[in-house]
C-alpha cells in the first residue's frame, strides 16, 4: 500500500479524534492556522483549474475539511466554556480585530459575515450544484449519441470514443457528488450560528454562576472569545464556500479563470472607453464627488487606449506570422501520404439531404448508421468499419452515392419532405405521386407528399420516409459487399474475440492447421453468399478438423457450410419447408466429370455449348418460379454446389444455391423445376 493511502487514512482518523480529545490553546492555534491555510490553498486551486474535472477530488475533500473545521469548533467551544474564555491567541486576536473598542458594532459585523456566508454564497453554491447535476444527467444520452455518431463517421477513433465516454461518466459523478457535498457546506453554516449562540449563552451562564466576575466583564470576555472563534471558523468556511461556487460555475476552458476573465472582461477596448465616457457624464450630476469619478474615468480611458494600440500590434504581428507560415508551407514539399487513405465505406450526398444527417436540425441518419452497424453484427457477424458521411456539391441536391473502398457501387435519389410508397399489397387503387424505383431493391414505387400518406396507408401501401430509404439501401450494400470488407485485420479481431472464451481452440487451429489468410478467404466466401459468420467457434472447429486434409479454401468453405447447417436451414427454411429448383442427374454427372484440379484448387471446365444450354434451361425455370412469387433456390449435390454457383453468377448473381449436406434432415422439400441440358 502506498504512503499516500496510509496518510489519508491517518488524517481522517485524527480528525475524528479531535472531536473527543481535549486540546490545549497552543495546539488549537496551530490547527486553526492549518485550517485557514488549507482553505486558502483549495480556493486558489479552483481559480487555476481549466475544467471542473481537473479537481475531481473536491467533493470528498470538501467533506473532510468540513469535518475538520467542525472538530475544531468543538475543541474551541470546550476551551471557551471550560477555560474562562481563553481559547488561544488566534481566537483572541481575531476577536479583538473585529470587536475593537465597540462590542455592539463588532457583534453586528460578525452577524453580517454569517448572513453573507449562509444566505448568499452557501445558498447560491447549493442551487448551482443542484442545477448542474440535473442538466449534466439530462445531457448524458445526447452526448453518448454524439460520440457514437462521431465514431461512425470516422471523426474519432475507438480509443478516443472510450475516453470521451469515460469523461462524460466522470462529469456526471462529479456534479452528482457536488450536489450532495454542497449540503455539507450549508449545514456547516447553520452549525456555526448555533455554536455561536451556545458559546455566548453558555459562557454568560458559567461566568455568572461560577462567580468572581462582573456581568459586564462576563459578557465582554465570552463575547470576544465567541466572536473570535466564529470568525476563525467562518473565514475558512467562507473560502471553501467561495471555492465551491467557483468550481460548480466553472465552464470548461483551455485557460485558468484569471486569464479568461482578463481576455473576456477587458479584451474589448471599446467597452473600457464607453465606461469612461459614462463616468464623465455621471460627474456632471450635482452633489456627486467629481474628483474620484473623473480620476476613475481617466483610468478607464487610458486602459482602453492602451489596449487598442496593443491589439493593433498583435494583429500586425499575427498577420506577418501567418504570411511567413504560408510562405514556409509553400516552400515545403507537399506531404501526399494522407491523400492515399481510402475509406472502406463512404456515403456522399447532395445539399438537400444534409438536414437528414444534421442532428441540430432533427436529422437521425447518424443514429440509423449506428443501428446499421449493430444489425450487421447480429445478422452476419461482421464488424462494419466506420462509415464516413460527407456532402458533395457535384451531386444533385437530392442524390446520394455509396462507395466501397473509394469506388462508387450504388447511387440513389430521395425527395425530402416526401414518402416512398410501394404497392406491396397489389392494390388496384391509385394514388398521386412521382413514379420512381426503390433504390435498395429496384421495385416500382411513388414519392408522395404528406397529404397522400394516410390514403396510401389505407390502401395497403408500404410507406417509408427518406432516412429509412437511405438506411435500407446502405444496409443492403454493406451486406452485398461485406466479403470485400473482410480483411485480415478484421479476421484477427474476430479471432482475438473468440480467443477470450475459447483459447484452446484458437491456439490449436490458428496458425497450426490453417493460416489467417485461409480463414479470411473462407469467411469471405461465406459472406459473399450471405451466410452469417457469427458462429466463429463452429467455423474454426470445422477448419481445424478438415484443414489437415486439404488447403483448398473452396472445399474448406463447403465443409464449413455443412457445419453451419442448422443456421442455414433456419435462414432459408424457417417453417421447415423449402421450394427449390433441382439439377438433373445428367447435368450433375457432366459437371462432376469436368471438375479439374490445380495447385490453386479445383475449377470447372465445360464446353461453351453445354454452358449455353444450361443457362437457357436455368433462365426458363427461374422465370417460371418467380412467376409464382417465390424466391428461386437451387438445390445441388455437395460436390458441385460451389462450381454451379460460380458458373451461374454470370446471369444470376443473387441466385441462392444450396446443397443437400447444408440442410437438416426433417426439411420438407418441394421441387418447382429441373435444370437440364
Image: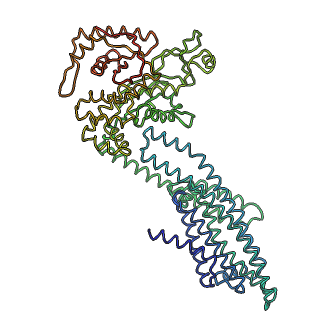
From the image, which quarter does the C terminus lie in? Answer: top left
Decide which of 537, 306 is in the foreground and name it. 537
Q: Residue furthest left?
A: 599
Relative horizontal placement of residue 6, taking residue 172 as reference (left or right): left
State whether residue 253 is above or below residue 471: below
State whether residue 209 is above or below residue 614: below
State whether residue 618 is above or below residue 381: above
Q: Where is residue 322 drawn, in percent x and y? A: 40, 48
Decide which of 294, 624 is in the foreground and name it. 624
Q: Where is residue 205 drawn, in percent x and y? A: 79, 82
Q: Where is residue 416 drawn, in percent x and y? A: 55, 25
Residue 118, picture quadrant: bottom right
State whether residue 291 is above or below residue 138: below
Name the residue located 44 percent from the left edge and 41 percent from the top edge: 155
Name the residue located 71 percent from the left edge and 84 percent from the top edge: 82
Count all numbered tags in the image, as a single digit: 0
Decide which of 79, 525 is in the foreground and name it. 525
Q: Where is residue 100 drawn, in percent x and y? A: 72, 81
Residue 241, picture quadrant: bottom right
Amino acid at each position: 500500500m502506498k504512503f499516500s493511502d496510509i496518510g489519508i487514512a491517518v488524517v481522517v482518523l485524527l480528525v475524528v479524534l479531535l472531536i473527543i480529545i481535549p486540546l490545549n490553546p497552543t495546539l488549537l492555534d496551530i490547527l486553526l492556522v492549518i485550517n485557514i491555510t488549507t482553505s486558502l490553498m483549495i480556493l486558489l486551486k479552483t481559480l487555476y483549474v481549466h475544467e471542473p474535472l481537473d479537481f475531481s477530488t473536491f467533493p470528498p475533500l470538501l467533506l473532510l475539511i468540513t469535518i475538520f473545521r467542525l472538530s475544531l469548533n468543538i475543541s474551541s467551544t470546550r476551551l471557551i466554556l471550560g477555560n474562562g474564555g481563553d481559547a488561544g491567541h488566534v481566537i483572541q486576536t481575531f476577536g479583538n480585530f473585529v470587536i475593537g473598542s465597540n462590542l455592539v458594532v463588532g457583534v453586528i459585523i460578525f452577524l453580517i459575515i454569517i448572513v453573507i456566508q449562509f444566505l448568499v454564497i452557501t445558498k447560491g453554491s447549493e442551487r448551482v450544484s443542484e442545477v448542474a447535476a440535473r442538466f449534466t444527467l439530462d445531457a448524458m444520452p445526447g452526448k453518448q449519441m454524439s460520440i457514437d455518431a462521431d465514431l461512425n463517421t470516422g471523426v474519432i477513433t475507438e480509443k478516443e470514443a472510450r475516453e470521451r465516454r469515460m469523461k462524460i461518466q466522470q462529469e456526471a459523478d462529479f456534479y452528482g457528488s457536488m450536489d450532495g457535498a454542497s449540503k455539507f457546506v450549508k449545514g456547516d453554516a447553520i452549525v456555526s450560528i448555533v455554536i455561536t449562540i451556545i458559546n455566548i449563552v453558555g459562557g454568560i451562564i458559567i461566568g455568572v454562576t461560577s462567580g468572581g466576575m462582573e456581568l459586564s466583564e462576563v459578557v465582554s470576555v465570552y463575547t470576544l472569545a465567541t466572536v473570535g472563534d466564529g470568525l476563525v471558523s467562518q473565514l475558512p468556511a467562507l473560502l471553501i464556500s467561495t471555492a465551491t461556487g467557483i468550481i460548480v460555475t466553472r465552464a470548461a476552458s483551455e485557460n485558468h479563470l484569471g486569464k479568461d476573465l482578463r481576455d473576456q472582461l477587458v479584451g474589448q477596448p471599446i467597452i473600457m472607453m464607453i465606461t469612461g465616457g459614462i463616468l464623465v457624464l455621471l460627474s456632471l450630476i450635482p452633489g456627486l464627488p467629481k474628483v474620484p469619478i473623473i480620476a476613475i474615468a481617466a483610468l478607464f480611458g487610458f486602459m482602453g487606449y492602451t489596449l487598442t494600440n496593443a491589439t493593433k500590434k498583435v494583429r500586425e504581428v499575427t498577420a506577418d506570422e501567418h504570411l511567413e507560415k504560408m510562405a514556409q508551407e509553400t516552400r515545403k514539399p507537399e506531404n501526399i501520404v494522407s491523400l492515399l487513405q481510402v475509406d472502406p465505406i463512404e456515403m456522399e450526398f447532395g445539399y438537400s439531404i444534409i438536414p437528414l444527417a444534421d442532428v441540430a436540425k432533427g436529422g437521425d441518419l447518424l443514429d440509423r448508421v449506428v443501428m446499421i452497424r449493430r444489425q450487421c453484427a447480429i445478422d452476419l457477424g461482421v464488424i462494419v468499419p466506420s462509415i464516413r458521411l460527407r456532402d458533395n456539391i457535384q451531386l444533385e441536391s437530392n442524390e446520394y452515392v455509396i462507395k466501397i473502398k473509394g469506388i462508387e457501387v450504388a447511387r440513389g435519389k430521395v425527395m425530402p419532405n416526401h414518402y416512398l410508397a410501394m404497392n406491396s399489397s397489389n392494390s388496384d387503387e391509385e394514388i398521386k405521386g412521382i413514379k420512381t424505383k426503390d433504390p435498395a431493391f429496384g421495385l416500382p414505387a411513388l414519392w408522395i407528399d404528406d397529404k397522400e400518406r394516410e390514403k396510401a396507408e389505407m390502401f395497403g401501401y408500404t410507406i417509408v420516409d427518406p432516412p429509412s430509404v437511405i438506411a435500407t439501401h446502405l444496409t443492403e450494400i454493406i451486406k452485398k459487399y461485406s466479403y470485400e470488407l473482410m480483411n485480415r485485420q478484421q479476421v484477427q479481431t474476430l479471432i482475438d474475440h473468440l480467443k477470450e472464451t475459447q483459447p484452446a481452440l484458437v491456439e490449436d487451429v490458428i496458425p497450426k492447421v490453417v493460416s489467417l489468410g485461409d480463414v479470411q478467404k473462407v469467411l469471405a466466401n461465406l459472406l459473399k453468399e450471405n451466410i452469417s459468420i457469427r458462429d466463429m467457434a463452429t467455423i474454426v472447429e470445422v477448419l481445424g478438423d478438415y484443414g489437415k486434409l486439404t488447403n483448398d479454401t473452396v472445399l474448406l468453405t463447403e465443409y464449413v457450410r455443412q457445419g453451419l447447417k442448422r443456421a442455414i436451414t433456419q435462414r432459408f427454411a424457417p417453417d421447415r419447408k423449402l421450394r427449390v429448383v433441382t439439377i438433373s442427374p445428367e447435368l450433375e454427372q457432366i459437371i462432376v466429370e469436368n471438375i479439374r484440379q490445380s495447385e490453386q484448387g479445383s475449377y470447372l471446365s465445360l464446353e461453351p455449348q453445354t454452358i449455353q444450354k444450361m443457362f437457357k434451361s436455368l433462365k426458363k425455370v427461374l422465370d417460371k418460379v418467380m412467376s409464382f412469387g417465390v424466391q428461386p433456390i437451387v438445390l445441388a449435390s455437395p460436390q458441385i454446389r460451389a462450381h454451379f454457383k460460380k458458373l451461374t453468377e454470370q446471369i444470376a448473381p443473387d441466385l441462392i444455391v444450396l446443397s443437400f449436406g447444408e440442410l437438416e434432415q426433417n426439411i420438407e422439400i418441394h421441387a418447382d423445376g429441373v435444370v437440364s441440358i
